[in-house]
Image (cartoon, coloured by chain):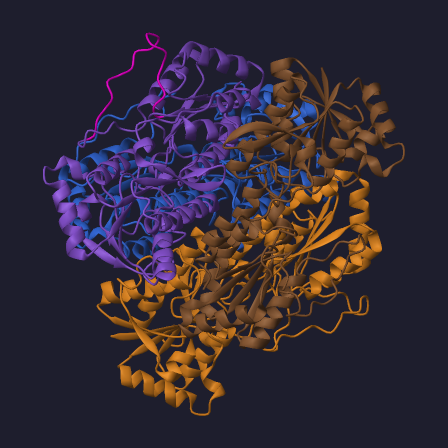
Chain colours: A blue, B orange, C purple, D brown
C-alpha cells in the first residue's frame, strides 16, 4: 500500500514519534511506502508532500514539533476541498490516510471518511480534552514543564514572601492546570470547570500568609479559568492580528486583584509556548509510538473512520464520529484530590 | 480517628507524596491524627514511630525516598508478630493502618486483615509488575531516568561506532526496559518475558553496523533478562553479603558475548540505584497523591482489606487478596510495538 | 568567634549553598558559632535572627532561595541605622558579619566597614554584572534555564513558521541574554549594550524566512534592551505598586513591531521569576560553596572591608570600595562571537 | 581559504558546537570553505572527508558527540604519516587545519606544526586536566550529570540507611569528582591527587551513621583514585580486548572494603559513558562556540602552532608546545573547600 500521513492543528511533543512509528510499521512490517503531507491538510489540498522512509525518520524520536509542519487549514472550508484531496491521492497513488490532529483535524477526517476517503485518526491535543481517549501524547510533557516551573517558583516566592500567579494552557478544560498544580504543590488552582470567587481566593491567601513567611502562595491559573458570573469584571480580551486571544489575560487580572486586595507583591509567570515545544517525556514517546504502530494496523485491517485511543493502558479503536464533539473535563475525583491541598 | 501509616520494601519516588496526601486528607478533611511508623513493619512491631501532621509534611512532595524510612521486615516472620502489631496499635490508640508497599508488604497487609487488623493497601513497585493496578508510582520516574541515560548514550555510541549495553531494573518483568528502550530509541531490548538468542542479537548488530557508522547500537537489558535455554552458559551470580544478586551480571555477560562475537567495542552502563532515587515526575506525584487521598477515604468507608488502584485513569479499590501473587508482564501489544524498532 | 550572616537583594540560586558553607567552615574548622539575620539588613536592624549550625543547614545545598529570607532594606536609609546594627551585634555578641548581596547590599557593607563594623562581602547578582568578580553564582543557573526554554521554542517555531520573542533578565547588562542566545541558537539577541535598529531586525527576519520554513526565528531580548535613539517610540513603562517596571515591556514592543512590519505571527515568552528560582547548577553550587568558605577565612584573617571574588578560577579578595559602582558589561569578544550566529 | 577540521580522542559534549562555530565564522565572516575529516586524524591520513557548510551544521549545536566521528589514530604512529597529511591537504587544497582534541591530538598538532603544517588547536578533555586552559568544554556537562546522579542517590541512601559509592571519570586528576562531590553534597570524595586511607574512610562512615539514620553516606570516587601505598592490596585491573581498564574497578574495591569493615550495606553506581554523551550545558555550548570562532581568527592571523584557551573569562592563545605535557590537578584551595564538607 501507499499511505499518506499529515499533522494538523497546534504542534505537540510526540508528533515526530507518531510519524516515525507510522513509517516504521508501514515500511518494515507491511512493505508499504509512505508520503508525508506538509502543513496538515494544506499539503493534501495543494499536493505538497515529501517521501518518508525509515532513514528519513532517523533521529526524530526525541525531537519536539513535527518534521511535516502543521497548519489549521481544513478541507471543508474550500468548496472543492474533497475533490482536491481525491486528486492528490490519486495522483500520488495514495491508498489511505493517517490524520494526526485535534478536534478540528479529526472532525475533518470523520467527514472525509463519510465522503468515502479511507482514513484513520490519531488524537492529538496538548490539553488532553478529547473524551474518547484516556490520554493524548504531549500532555504529559506539558504537565512536566509546568511542574518544573512551579518547583522553581516556590523558592523565590518563599524568599521574598510573594504571591506568584502562573498561567498554564487549557482553554476549555483544566487538565494541565490541575495536574501541574497538584504535582507542583500549588496553593490554589483555578480551572474553567470551576469558576472562581476572587474574594475567597484573596481570603485564603491572607489566611495562609498570616501563618508565617514560608507560606508564600503559588496560584496556578488555566488560561480558560473564569470568575463566577457577576463577581469580577473582565477586560475585553486583547486579540492578535490572527484573532487569537493574547496569553496572559486571566493571569494578569487575577494577579492585579490579589495585589490590590491583599497588599502582597504579586508576580505573573506565563509559560506560553515552552509548554508545547521540546523533547517529549518518555511517557509521551511511548504513547505516540504505540499510536503510530496501531494506526497502520488499523489501515491494514480496513478500520477506516476509526481513531486509535488509549483505554486501560491498551490501544483500542473508537469511531471518529464519537471521538469529536465531547469535551473531556477534569474528573470530580481528581479535582477533589487536588483541592485537598488548596490552602 | 487515629491512623497509622508505613512504607515497606525498596524505596521509590513518590512515597513521600503518598504520605503527605494521607496526612492532608486525614487531618484536614476528617480531623484525624496520623502516626508514621519507622522502617516499614519494623516500626509497627517495635513501637517506633513519629507523629505526622500537615506542617511536618511541608516540602516533602518533590523529594524522593521516604521520610519514614523503609525495610523488608515482615510481621509474619515473627511468631508473635501479629500480637506485637496489636499491642502497638492499642498502645497508640491507632484505629486503622495504611500500608504502602509491594508484593511482600501487601501480602502481609492481606494476612493482617485476615487476622482482624483494619488495614488498607497502597501498591508500590518501581517495576510496575503488580497485576491489580494499571500503574504504580515511581515507575514513570524510573523509565524517564533510564530514557534520559539512553538519550545521552546515543551520541557517544555514534561518535565511536560502539555498542552500548544498558542494564535497567526489572527482575521479573521488563516494563522499565521495554518502555525506556522504546522511548530512548534502543536498537534492541532484552526482557525476562522473551528469552533471547545471543546469536540472533549479534547478527542483528553486525547487519546494523554494516549499514554505516551512524548505526551504532544500544542494547537495553532488563536485569532479569535470560538467554534461551541451552544457548548460553550463565556464570553463577555473585551475591552480596545480604544474599542479593549483584547488579550488572546479565549486562556484563551480554556485552562480553557481543564483543567476542562481533568484534565491536562494547561498553556497559548499569544505572542501578539512580533509577529509584530523586524527585518524582509530575505523573508519579499526581498518582501518588491520588492514592494517598483515596486510601483515607477507603478507611473512612470501612473498606478494609482493600488496595487502591488505577483503572482507566480512575482510582478504584481491589481486594488485597487479588492484589498479590499475580505478576503483570509486558503486554503482547506493547512488546510488538517496541519490537518494530528493533534493528 | 561569633559570626553573623545575612542575604540581601533579589534571591538567587546558590544563596543557601553560601550559608551552608559559611556555617560549616566557621563551626567545624574554627569552632565559631553563627547567627543568621532574617530578610537581609532588616534582621540586623531589628534584631531578628536565628541560630545556625551544621544540622540546621542539612539538605539546603540543592535548594534555591534563601532560608534566611531577603529584602531590599538598607541600614543607611535610617538615621539610626548604624547604631541599630551596632546594638544588635553587641547584644548578640556578634564579632563580624558576612553580607551576601548585590550592588546595594555590598555598598552598604562598604559603608558599614567605613563606620568601623567588621564585615566581609560575598557578591551576588543573577545578572553577573559586578565588575570585580569574573562570575557570580546563580548566573549560570539563570542562563541554563533560559537556554532550556529556547531549546524548547525551536521546535514549535519551526512547526508553525513563527517568530518567537523571549525576554530574559538583564536590566543594565546583557550577560544572560547573550549567553543563552548563543547557547540556545537564537537568530538574534538584543542587549542593553547595543541599542537595536528595529528595521534591521525585521529585515533580517524577512531574509531568514525567505530561505525556507525551517528558518523560523527566535529573538532573545534582555529586559534592558533599548532601540537606537529616535528610531522607535517606547510606551511609558507600566509600573507595579512598588514602582518596579512590569516585565515584558520591551518584548511586547519588539514582538508587536515584528508582527506589524513582517507579517509573521510572533509570540512572546517572558521567563520572569523561573530564571531565579529552583535548584542551582553544579557550577553555581561549587562557586557558592567556595565563596562561603573563603568568606570565613577572610574574617579570621581580619580582611574586613573586602569581598571574595573569582579570578582565573581562583578565589581572591578585592576591596568592597572597588567592588561596587562599576558595571561589568558584555565583552566585545563574546558579543562578536555571539553575533556570528545572528541570521 | 580552505580550512580542514577534525575531532580526535574520546568524545565530549560540545564538539559539534565547536565545529558549527568554525564553519560559521569561516564561511560567513571570511568567505572560507571548510572540509571536515572523519574520525580524527584517520580521515586526514586516509583522505576521508566531507564538505561542511552552515546548512550542514544546522541543528547540531545542542547535540552531543561529533558529526565527524572520532578515533585515537595518530599521524606519527605511521612512518609516512606526515607525508599522507601533506598529500591529503594538497589534494583538497586545504590551507590550514583546526585540530580539536586532548593531550594526544594536541601533541600531534604540535609535531605537525613543527613539521611545517599550518595548524591551530582547540583543547578538549572531559577531565579538564589540560594545564594551559582554565576550562575545557564538556567538563561542566560531565560534572552536572554526575551531580544529578548524586542528588538522586541521597534519597535512596537515606531511606535504606545505606552507603553508596559512585564512580565518576578522572583517571589522572579528580576535577569531576571533587566538583560533583562538592555540588552533590557527598560525604567523602576520593581523588588521584590524595591517596586514601581505607581505614580512615571506614571510621568516618561509622562515626557518621552513629549520628542517626539521615546520615547515610555517599562516597564519590574518581576512577583514578588509589589507596595510600601499602594500605590496601588492589586486584590486577581487568582489561578489555583493546587494553583499556574496565570501569568500576576502584569503586568495587572501595565498596567491598566498606561493606566488610563497617557492616553497612554498600551499593555501587558506575556512571560510565553517560557522563560524556548527550546535550551540553549552556556553559559548554558557549565556551565551545567561542573556541571555534577564535580558532578561525587565529588561522587568519597566522597564529599557527597555537591553541585557543580560556583565561579570566577571555579567549587567549597559548603555544601548543606549552599546552601539552603538564597535567592540571585539583587546586589546594578547591580541595580544601570541598573537604570542609567531608563527614
Indicate yes or no whether the magenta region holds residue A172.
no
Indicate yes or no whether the magenta region holds residue C233.
yes
Vertical position of residue B321 compared to residue C193: above or below = below
Range drawn in magenta: C223-240
Q: Where does the image place residue C302, in percent across and percent down from the top left? A: 32, 47
- Does residue D259 appear left or right of residue C37 in this picture? right
Q: Where does the image place residue C107, in percent across and percent down from the top left? A: 26, 34
Near-viewer residue (A265 or C32): C32
Q: Where does the image place residue D253, in percent across and percent down from the top left? A: 64, 67
Residue A200 visible? The answer is no
Most extreme residue toward the top is: C230
Quadrant where the N terminus of chain A lies? top right
Q: Quadrant of residue B292?
A: bottom left
- Does residue D191 appear left or right of residue A181 in this picture? right
Q: Where does the image place residue D166, in percent across and percent down from the top left? A: 57, 59
Q: How many marks?
A: 0
Amino acid at each position: 500500500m501507499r499511505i499518506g500521513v499529515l499533522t494538523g492543528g497546534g504542534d505537540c511533543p510526540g508528533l515526530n514519534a507518531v510519524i516515525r512509528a507510522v513509517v516504521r510499521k508501514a515500511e518494515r512490517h507491511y512493505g508499504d511506502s509512505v508520503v508525508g503531507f506538509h502543513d496538515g491538510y494544506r499539503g493534501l489540498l495543494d499536493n505538497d508532500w515529501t517521501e518518508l522512509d525509515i532513514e528519513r525518520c532517523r533521529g526524530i524520536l526525541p525531537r519536539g514539533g513535527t518534521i511535516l509542519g502543521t497548519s489549521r487549514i481544513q478541507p471543508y472550508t474550500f468548496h472543492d476541498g474533497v475533490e482536491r484531496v481525491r486528486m492528490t491521492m490519486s495522483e500520488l497513488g495514495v491508498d489511505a490516510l493517517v490524520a494526526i490532529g485535534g478536534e478540528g483535524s479529526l472532525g475533518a477526517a470523520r467527514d472525509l471518511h463519510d465522503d468515502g476517503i479511507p482514513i484513520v485518526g490519531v488524537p492529538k491535543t496538548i490539553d488532553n480534552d478529547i473524551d474518547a481517549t484516556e490520554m493524548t501524547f504531549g500532555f504529559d510533557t506539558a504537565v512536566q514543564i509546568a511542574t518544573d516551573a512551579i518547583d522553581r517558583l516556590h523558592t523565590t516566592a518563599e524568599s521574598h514572601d510573594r504571591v506568584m500567579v502562573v498561567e498554564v494552557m487549557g482553554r476549555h478544560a483544566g487538565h494541565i492546570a490541575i495536574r501541574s498544580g497538584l504535582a507542583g504543590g500549588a496553593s490554589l488552582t483555578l480551572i474553567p470547570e470551576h469558576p472562581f470567587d476572587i474574594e475567597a481566593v484573596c481570603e485564603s491567601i491572607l489566611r495562609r500568609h498570616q501563618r508565617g513567611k514560608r507560606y508564600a502562595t503559588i496560584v496556578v491559573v488555566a488560561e480558560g479559568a473564569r470568575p463566577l458570573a457577576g463577581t469580577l469584571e473582565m477586560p475585553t480580551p486583547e486579540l492578535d492580528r490572527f484573532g487569537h486571544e493574547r496569553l496572559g489575560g486571566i493571569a494578569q487580572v487575577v494577579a492585579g486583584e490579589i495585589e490590590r486586595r491583599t497588599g502582597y507583591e504579586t508576580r505573573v509567570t506565563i509559560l506560553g509556548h515552552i509548554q508545547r515545544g521540546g523533547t517529549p517525556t518518555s511517557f509521551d514517546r511511548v504513547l505516540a509510538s504505540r499510536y503510530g504502530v496501531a494506526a497502520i494496523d488499523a489501515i491494514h485491517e480496513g478500520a477506516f473512520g476509526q481513531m486509535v485511543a488509549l483505554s486501560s493502558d491498551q490501544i483500542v479503536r473508537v469511531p471518529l464520529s464519537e471521538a469529536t464533539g465531547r469535551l473531556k473535563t477534569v474528573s470530580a475525583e481528581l479535582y477533589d484530590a487536588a483541592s485537598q491541598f488548596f490552602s
